[in-house]
Image (cartoon, rainbow, N blue to C red):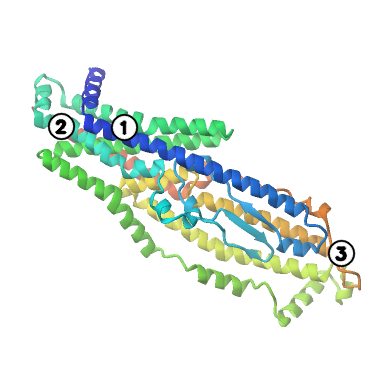
Amino acid sequence: MKASLTAYEWTLLRRDRRAWWALLSLGALVLLAFALNAAQLARANADKARIAQQERARWLGQGEKDPHSAAHYSIYAFKPAPTLAALDPGVEPYVGQALWLEAHAQNDMLYRPQGEAGPLQRAGAISPAALLIGFAPLVAFLLAFGAMAMDRERGTLRLALGAATRPGAIVAAKALAIWAALLLALLAPTTLAAVVLASAQHAFDTDLALRLSAWSLAMAAWLGVLTAIGIAASTFAGGVRTALALLFGLWIVFALVLPRWADSAVERAQPLPSTQSIKQRLTDEAPAFWTAETARENQARLLAQHGAQRKEDLKVDLRGAELDMNERHAYRVFDRVLGDFYGRVLAQDRAYAGWGLLSPAIAIQSLSPAFAGGDFAHHRGFIDGAETYRRALVNRMNQDVMAHPTQHGGAKHTSGAALWAQIPPFQHRPPALSAAWGSAAPALWSLLLWCALALGALWLAARRLRP
């Protein structure tokens, strides 16, 4: 019985041309956005790989020089865009894509795609996730309005109830038909396209399969919540005009007003320090150059560590040991100052995800980039990986300086290709989903709560239906 009712509702849904064309148009736009994003990301990744190869060749071919100078004129690390960024780029357009790795400094990332884009490109920046979050509510509510409010206005619903059809079966059939239409037109083509893209790039592994599955299930839940809310609101409204106004208002509040309000609330409650203040702290606590007094204190400490009375008695190069001491001091400062800053950014993300209790749009806005690999937690994974690589490079250069003492009157030590080749190429390994989505975890519980509330609303709607 329920299957035949669902098939009947599906037939009625296809006959509603205005709603059907709106659904298909949005589906085509979602698929087009995926194709454009995928092509753009593929070009960007190809450019990054090509320049990275050139940087590697420059590093290996830089000739004879002081190893510490080589650490200063180091190398760029490039951040490859994740495959599923075509679904939801997250913060990718707003954060840097390249990082200059050098001694004494943990530099800011360079080249922000959105910052380099023109006004028209910035205004037209869309993604499948943004379209599904921003406009799927409007289409879902339009379908629910036609299936419930218009049916009641035309008298079709009264005839169905008068034919001894249970109200619960009618509501369930309408919900299943609308949800199936949303999944088939909006979600299934894009998910299939993501599978094809990952397979073509030979990037389809267990982690990516888990990410894509999680993203698709979250979007399916989002579309299901919209379907249930749309049917329930159309049922509770007194008439067609009231139902239309209510649904339109819910779209504005859920998708537009509450996410912006929550973002502002998080900014006010947990403000971030300015970039200038962070840089000033780093300069004050980890200066690139020491004062004469500090240099004397550090030399005395180094002599004591190596059991020497004079610098001429040291078995390591004094300059190299001083450089190594300076770097390791800076590492601790960077970990404390920048680590605290990054932690506060992640705390903002968690706080925003917690506001998903107010709106399912907020919950899916937090979950989508986390599953796709485009949120700040994944971006920090690149920053940490690049910094680990930078420290290994700088430490190796300083070790080579330390191993060739010059305080006995010898010539300044230089190294060449044999040392440069000991530094492996930089390879970014994105964190696994299980290790990087913690900041969005509150959003998952919020979305599950909204699913329960949506089912409860459908149950109330079924109880309210009368012939």
Whether residues under marks 1 and 2 lie with C-beta atoms below 8 angstroms apart, the answer is: no
Tell me residue 96's x, y (percent): 54, 56
For the point 45% across and 65% down, which residue is it? 272
Q: Which mark is residue 132?
A: none
Q: Which residue is mark 1?
A: 24
Q: Which residue is mark 2?
A: 463
**What secondary structure is found at the residue carrying circle 3?**
loop
Q: Please name the amino acid that badge 2 sits on.
A: Arg
Residue 155's place in the image compared with 230, above or below, is: above
Query: Does residue 83 appear left or right of residue 456 in this picture?
Result: right
Q: Which comes before the other along the chain, label 2 or label 3?
A: 3
Q: Please name the amino acid that badge 3 sits on.
A: His
Residue 176's place in the image compared with 338, above or below, is: above
Of badges 3 and 1, nearer the viewer stands 1
Query: Does residue 42 appear left or right of residue 6 in this picture?
Result: right
Residue 210's place in the image compared with 44, above or below, is: above
Q: Which residue is mark 3?
A: 404
For the point 79% across and 72% down, which residue is it? 302
Q: Which comes before the other along the chain, label 3 or label 1?
A: 1
Of badges 2 and 3, nearer the viewer stands 3
